[in-house]
Image: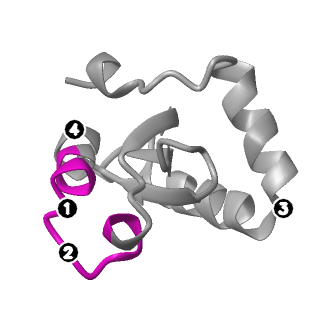
Amino acid sequence: MEKSGTVYIMCSPNKNVLYTGVTSELANRIWKHKSKFYPKSFTAKYNCVMLVYFKHYNSISEAIMEEKRIKGGDRKQKEDLILGINPVWKDLSNDVY
């Protein structure tokens, strides 16, 4: 049986930088971004510590396809996704833990 997956978007506190990712363990991944577990990573470098969007999928392969689609889009499309579930760009991390 295939694992489920989640597509998520992190942003910097000033909302200038967005990062789109996919994971099968969202809480753990968000903790790693917030704690800068990988100090040389994109999210650590650009301080992407706010979870502003996430969507769960029944299979990791579905989630990966959606991540690629989102990454292929422009910033406006990403902002529209965020605004659709999180119009005030609140940090949704507490909704995950």
Distance (Cα) linking label 4 and label 2? 18 Å
Amino acid type assigned to the residue bearing label 2 in the image: Pro
Residue 2 forms part of the magenta stretch: no
Residue 93, by quadrant, is top left
Report whether residue 57 is seen.
no
Mark sitting earlier along the chain (4/3) = 4
Display coloring:
one colour
Query: Residue 95 vs residue 38: left or right?
Result: right
Q: Which residue is found at the position 53% from the left and 59% from the top?
A: 19
Residue in the foreground of this view, choosing between 26 and 87 = 87
**Circle 2 residue:** 39
**Circle 4 residue:** 27
Amino acid type assigned to the residue bearing label 1 in the image: Lys
Query: Residue 97 vs residue 10: left or right?
Result: left
- Residue 46 against residue 59 in the figure, above or below: below
- Residue 22 against residue 50 in the figure, above or below: below
- SS at circle 2: loop
What range is drawn magenta here?
31-44
Q: Residue furthest front?
A: 14
- SS at circle 1: loop
Mark sitting earlier along the chain (1/4) = 4
Residue in the foreground of this view, choosing between 87 and 46 = 46
Q: Label 3 near label 4: C-beta < 8 Å?
A: no
Residue 33 forms part of the magenta stretch: yes
Distance (Cα) linking label 2 and label 1? 5 Å
